[in-house]
Amino acid sequence: MDAKEFLISAQEMMQGEREIDYRNAGSRAYYGAFHACRMLLEKLPHSQASIGTSHQRVINGLLSDPNKQINSLGNKLARAKDFRQKANYQLNLKFSRYEAMRLFSLAQKIYDEVDDLLLSLKK
């Protein structure tokens, strides 16, 4: 399975009309970005063989990278994680279609940047 499938699923869920659809869409979008970033870290020559599945460890791995573009991905993924935590855990706060769309847009941007970086690593 590819991380992109999470983004496709998120896009489909945003077509729903219930708050749970938006929360699920936001969560899936985040995981598309998270898995893409984790894959990037595992392919970097100076990275550990396996970064694991800790969200903060992936973010920290990106933030500590000397490459400014990879470092920037860490900041973006941290923002996306904040959105995802609201969608998953803060049930007392409304999570709107607009928020799901913002998270999806950020996750798509992260995914695209990771995809570009992975292509440049192959060259």
Image (cartoon, helix red, strand yellow):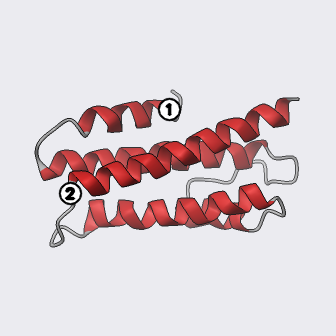
Q: Is residue 1 positioned above or below 59 on the image?
A: above
In the displayed structure, 42 sits above or below 95; it is above
Mark number, residue 89 = none
* Residue on which the image places disc 2: 96
Q: Kindly indicate the quadrant of the structure image that contains residue 15.
A: top left
Instruction: Return the residue at label 1.
Output: 4
Q: Position of residue 23 (x, y in %)?
A: 25, 52
Looking at the picture, which amino acid does disc 1 mark? Lys
**Callout 2: helix, strand or loop?**
loop
Determine which quarter of the picture holds residue 117: top right
Give me the residue at 30% from left, 66% from top: 86
Q: Is residue 12 left or right of residue 8?
A: left
Residue farthest toward the left in the current orientation of the protein: 18
Q: Residue 60: horizontal and vertical position, in percent? A: 66, 67
Query: Where residue 50 sits: x, y (%)?
Result: 71, 49
What type is the residue that disc 2 sits on?
Ser
Q: Of 42 and 20, which appears nearest the observer?
A: 20
Q: Position of residue 76 (x, y in %)?
A: 56, 61
- Residue 103 shown left or right of residue 87 in the figure: right
Q: Nearer the viewer, residue 24 or 11?
A: 11
Residue drawn at 11 percent across, 47 percent down = 18
